[in-house]
Structures are given as structure tokens and as C-alpha cells.
Image: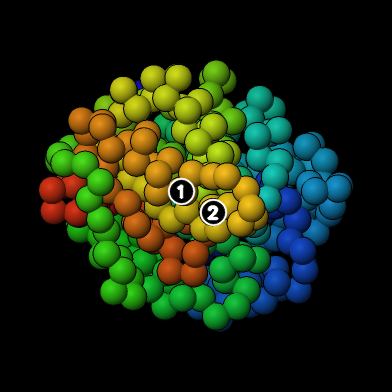
Amino acid sequence: MKIIRPKKLNKGDLIGIISPASSADDLSKVETGVNYFEKLGYKIEVGKNVGKSQGYLAGSNEERINDLHYMFKKKEVKAIISIRGGYGSTRLLDKIDYNIIRKNPKIFVGYSDITALQMAFFTKAGLVTFAGPMVAVDFHNEIDPSAEENFWKMITSNKKVGKVSCPNDERIFQLTKGDRSGRVIGGNLSLITSLVGTKFLPQMKDKILLLEEIGEAPYRIDRMLNQLRLNKVFNQVSGIILGTFVDCNEKDPTKKTLTLSEVIEEYFAHLKIPIVYNFRHGHIKDNITVPLGINLRVNANKSCVEYLESAVD
């Protein structure tokens, strides 16, 4: 499969804003997010269906697909940034025209529920996408300076980034030993698990798997990791990066439980591939943007993650 890197973003370029999953809980956040980009010198086009709502969805499947197709087809649009995650991306996967994506490669940004689209774009079109900040989540307010710097460097420069430094004196930790390279795929654990058994989950052989999660109790993390284990995912990948698992502990003190650490230890500690944890990616302010689909190195011996190529041309 041919891997396609999008063109880098330049000042004055047009950025498209869409809601492929849920709608913003407060539409003023979209406005302030748009203002942020315009102040930096970018032009903005908001999808015509942004702001619509159908229960927990940002409009009907057709409305959300139309905005997605429109932004990819419009030549002037150089990057597409999601409003937020939530729920609904998986509903679109078998309705997307992947020829449009393949013929019009461009920067596509989001995380959380957007993971489903990113995995499908990689599998069906070979497109490198960006697990990074979203309009109504990260850009509507004071964005973390490290997250901001990392994001813009990733999409505006075609220089190789190299070793990734964790912000705010955080450290990456070793879980197992080893040093391997491969194309990084993954994102949100729930979404990766939901794609198992479908044609939209990438082939896992020789890949580096990135996982993050929010708000799932240890028994649910256990169930999802077991689903991946039963599907032989951990036997195929070359390495694993565990991002942040936010609010993933049992809240009821009377309930018998394993800790999150115990669950992670059980599934990963015995594997003969490099695994690191506390990589600052996920539902956090100091979120490191990860270009999904590029070659990446995990050196667990040195607790190091290194991007081996640029994400944009």
C-alpha cells in the first residue's frame, strides 16, 4: 500500500472545520476556535452542517458525510480539523468514498472518536493523519503552549522531528525491553477495539500500536485489551506506546477491582516487544500530536520515542 503524506500547511491557507462525530456542547467554542486560527493568519471555512444536532450526533450520517466529502474535494482546503470527538465516526466508515480521500490528500486532525476515521483513511487510502488538538476542545480556550508548539511544528514543517520530548518535565517510562521501528497506528482504545473484525482496522503486522483512553473502569479496559489479545494484535505489532489513561480507575470504593496498573501489567509485561508508558498523548491539555502512519521508533531501553520521518511534504 502506498503511504500518502499531505502537503504542509502555509500561512494564509484555508482550513476546513467539520463535526464528523458529536456536536460541540457549546457552539460559542467553535467561534472562539475559529478566531484563534484567523488571528494566526489562516482562512477558515466551517462545514455547512456544523452546529446541527441529532441526539448525541452532530447531524445525520448524510449531513456529516457531506461535510467530510466537501472539505476533501475542495482544492483550496489544505487542512481539515474536527470540532470534537464524542460518538458517531464509526457510523460513517462504510459510507465514505475513499477515492475522494486518496485523490485529495490533506491534513486531517482529531483524536478520541475521530480515531475510527483516521484508521479507515490509513487502511483504505494510505493517508497519514494527525492525532492532535480539536477546535472546540483544545483551541477554544488557552491551549497548552507545549501542545500548541508541537502541533504547528508537525503540520507546517517538513523537517524530521526526531526524538519526542514530553512536556512539563513528564517522563516516558519503560515497561518492557527492546528497540523497534514501524509505522505508528492506533489512538483511542475503545475505537480501535470497535474496529476489530471490520475491514477498516489496519493490518497490525510490524506496526507500532499507540493506545490512550478516558473514563473507562479497569474491568472495561481489561475487556478491551482482551479483545485485542484474542485477535492476536499483540503478537503482530513491533512495539506499543501507552499514552494517557485519564480517569480510568474504579470510583466505587466498595467494589472489588483490579487497579489499572495491574490490568496493564497482566497484558503487556510478558511481551517480547518494546513497550513504553506515560507518553503524553490523549485526553490531556499537554497532548503530543502523533502523525498516524509515519515511521516511528520505540526504544524502550532508553524510554524514548522517535519520529523517523516528517509527517508532511
- Residue placed most toward the observer, 245 or 297: 245
Q: Residues within 10 Å of mark 2 (few under 14, many from 20)?
A: some
Whether residue 210 is visible to the viewer of this picture, yes or no, is no
Q: Are the residues flagged by discs 2 and 1 in contact, CB closer than 8 Å? A: yes
- Residue 147 picture quarter: bottom left
**2 to 246, vertically: above or below:** above
Q: How is the image coloured?
A: rainbow
Whole-percent x and y of residue 16? Answer: 61, 57
Q: Label 1 is placed on what type of residue?
A: Leu
Q: Which residue is mark 2?
A: 249
- Residue placed most toward the observer, 122 or 258: 258
Residue for point 46% across, 76% down: 144
Between discs 2 and 1, the one toward the N terminus: 2
Residue for point 78% across, 37% down: 61
Left or right: 72 in relation to 294: right
Residue for point 32% across, 51% down: 277
- Residue placed most toward the observer, 46 or 116: 116
Label 2 – label 1 distance at C-alpha: 6 Å
Q: Label 2 is placed on what type of residue?
A: Asn
Left or right: 120 in relation to 278: right
Q: Which mark is residue 260?
A: 1
On-image quarter of the N terminus:
top left
